[in-house]
Structure formats: C-alpha cells, structure tokens
Amino acid sequence: MGRWEPDARGRMARAALELYAERGYEQTTAADIADRAGVTERTFFRHFADKREVLFDGSAQLQAAVVASIAGADDAAPLDIACGAFVAAAPILEERRDHARRRAAVIAANTSLQERELLKMSTLASAATGALRKRGVAAPDAQVAAHTAVGLFGIGFERWVAADDGTSLAEQITRALADLRQLAGTSG
C-alpha cells in the first residue's frame, strides 16, 4: 500500500490494534505500525505523539461531544444532564463496536495503558465539570455529577463491549444510571 493511499490515520489505528493483539503492546513499535499501515514512521509521528495515542485517538471527539451536549441540554438535574451528554455522545463509539472491543482488550492487558485510560477519563470528568459550571451548577454538585456520569459511562461501556445482546452503548449507560438510582433508593 503506497503512502498516497487515503485514510492513513485509520489504517494506522487498525494496524496498531492488529499488532497489539498479535504481539502485545510492549513488543510493538511505531515503526511496526507504520510498516503494517503502509506509511513511513515519520507519517506515523505526524498523526500520533506516540504508540499509546493510537488507542486514545477519539478522546477529543468524545469530550467535545459531551461538552457540547451539556451546553445545549434542557434544564434538568445536573446528573441527568451529564449522563444525558454521554448517552448523546454514545453513537461516536457505537459506530466502531468491534474496534472498541479490541481496544478494551489491549488496554486491559497493559497496566500503563490502564493508567492512561484513567487519565483520559479524569480529563473528561474535568471537562464535563467545567461545562456544568458554565451552566451555573455549583462547584461541588457539578463535580459530583460529572464524575458520577463518567463512572456510569465506564460501567456502561464495559457492559456494552462484553454483551452480545444487541444492546446499544446508550442503553447500557442508561441502565447503569437506573442501577445507581435503585441502589440509592431514588427514582429518576
């Protein structure tokens, strides 16, 4: 495949997942990914800071969608707004379910990638907190709602990648919120 072929970024993401699954994350280099994708190593580094970032490429898009949804939401309780934003953003991931499953398996097999995932989720929670604060939600409430929504998103995501019942990510997030409400003894 020549360097001029379209979708170099997508090819590199697919190549990385394939190689991480075949060889393991630690045994795969950026040069290996570039070679498999049919691009130069220099091209790889034009798109990604390092080989970890291939796995976290969609983080900014997800964060932007969550923040925009919070900003545009109707008036409701902060937790409902925050969870609703993750439900609204779910189609971004739902389009790539197989990729999400493979990515989750690679991250689960590597402690440093798990740490990176936690950092990305913390950054997402901070962005959601900021978006809630811009809506006028008090600092403690915004923080609790945003971090809880990120946790429920994580639970929904884990259930979604593990399930084969056709349930969408949005439905899994909604179920996680319902589970929280039942646990807390409240209704929504």
Image: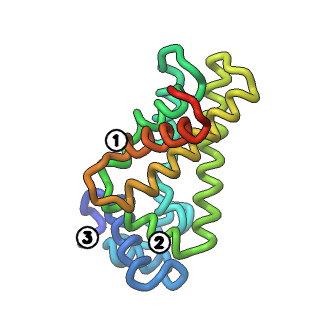
Q: Say which residue label 3 marks.
A: 2
x and y, in percent, of residue 70 in the image? 52, 26
Q: Amino acid at mark 2?
A: Val
- Residue in front for this viewpoint, 174 or 91: 174
Q: Amino acid at mark 1?
A: Pro
**Callouts 3 and 1 close, C-beta under 8 Å:** no
From the viewer's perspective, is the residue at label 3 or at label 1 nearer? Answer: 1
Mark closer to the chain start, 2 or 1? 1
- What kind of element bears circle 3? loop
> Callout 2: few (<14), some (14-19), or many (20+) C-alpha neighbours within 10 Å?
some
x and y, in percent, of residue 35 in the image? 37, 78
Mark closer to the chain start, 3 or 1? 3
> Callout 1: few (<14), some (14-19), or many (20+) C-alpha neighbours within 10 Å?
some
- What kind of element bears circle 1? helix
Q: Say which residue label 2 marks.
A: 106
Side (left or right) of 26 relative to 97: right
Q: Say which residue label 1 marks.
A: 91
The residues bearing labels 3 and 1 have C-alpha atoms spaced at a distance of 32 Å
Q: Quadrant of the N terminus?
A: bottom left
- Residue in front for this viewpoint, 103 or 9: 103
The residues bearing labels 2 and 3 have C-alpha atoms spaced at a distance of 28 Å
Can residue 8 be seen in this snapshot? no
x and y, in percent, of residue 174 in the image? 43, 38
